Image (cartoon, helix red, strand yellow):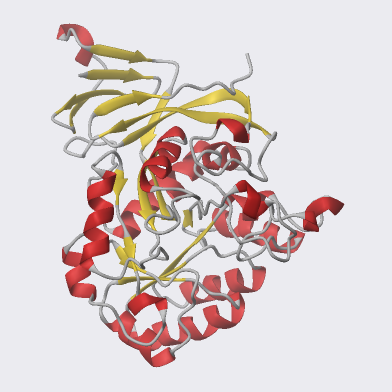
Amino acid sequence: MIIKAKNITLKIENGKIIQIGNDLSQNSSEVCDLNQYTIIPGIIDMHCHLREPGFEYKEDINSGIQSALNGGIVGICPMANTNPVNDNIFILNKMIEKADKKIGFFPICAITNNLYGDNLTDFKKLKENGAIAFSDDGMPLLNKELFKNALKTGELIISHCENETKEVKWQLEILKEVGGRLHFAHISKKASIDLIRKAKKEGIQVTCETAPHYFTFNTDNLSKDFFKNGVYKMNPPIGTKKDMEAVIEGLFDETIDVIATDHAPHSIDEKIKDYTISPNGIVGFETVIGATLSKFNLELLVKKMAINPAKILGLNDFNNLKTGSWANLTIIDENIKWKVDQNKFKSKCKISPFNAMEFKGKAVGTIINGKLNMIENEEIQQ
């Protein structure tokens, strides 16, 4: 199959890119003309929650995958805080089997058994069975000796910091002491960003991510209705204007390596409860490209949502625009103007702080292991 896009022409066979050039379509009968669109390395979301097993009324693996594909995402890394917890090869294998190769599926397993924070899981066995990294997301690991032992395994540890700045500080100190691979999830505070920037300048090997809600919203520009329900409630919470500006600066100056969604769906009944009792979480797959392109250019999006996640996760040749790579790609129309309609989400969660916002730029399709899948875009403004 030959795919012609605005920026590139690809020949794909058996799921891989075998040739790149301008004259590939001359002697081929199977040509897909996508000249009005841009093909980019496939977007990988390295932080999401699919809620299965245990909370399928919020989301399940199938609905989560459909939501991700509808947002132009070709690879997802679901967190382990399911019920039962994804801390053993039985749950891990069941999740991978359920995903059925519909998308790049790279589960993150628990650091500690049942997320209790007292005993490490069997990293080696879990890694051999498909775990991409380890995190007690939602339950910060506060045992410093256990944290050291986790880093000493050499596996990628994704840290959720509840008391963000305090925990970032001591975890960076331990990383400097023992080495290892540490990635901070959903960084949102200026003080934390300053600490990570300083650590990187000192040569400490650390990576981190933020999410679109932290560079889109801040407490100064939210309405007085902010605390009436949980639509804007997530963890870490929306920060101040200075925090938001620091997140943007951190993305530009390479302090923040990745944009992830922290897709964490809940039912509408749960989210519209009073802010104090509503659960933390935001649905994010289907708005991430629009929200990001409303603040940054396509080059930054590709770096933070495709190239850097693949590098950090060790997904060599999963989503590269080069010969020999698997054809896992995202197709974007940079000029589409559209309005977010939460009722049309493929996710089971149909409530979002991005609802009714107008964006420019949207995914119009994906290529998964060489298979072209175009997206129906009902929200496009004609």
Q: What residue is at 28 percent from the left and 78 percent from the top?
A: 121
Question: Where the C terminus falls, by quadrant?
Answer: top right
Front in this rendered view, residue 367 or 51: 51
Residue 123 as seen in the image, left or right of residue 157: left
How many numbered discs? 0
Give the residue furthest to the right: 224
Q: What residue is at 63 percent from the left and 54 percent from the top?
A: 270
Q: Can residue 92 be seen here?
A: yes
Front in this rendered view, residue 244 or 105: 105
Q: Position of residue 343 (x, y in %)?
A: 60, 33
Question: Where the N terminus falls, by quadrant?
Answer: top left
Q: What residue is at 43 percent from the left and 55 percent from the top?
A: 51
Residue 217 sits above or below residue 169 on the image: above
Front in this rendered view, residue 379 or 170: 379
Q: Position of residue 109 (x, y in %)?
A: 32, 66
Q: Would you identify the image quadrant in which residue 167 lies?
A: bottom right
Residue 360 sits above or below residue 280 on the image: above
Q: Position of residue 158 (x, y in %)?
A: 41, 69
Residue 118 as seen in the image, left or right of residue 333: left
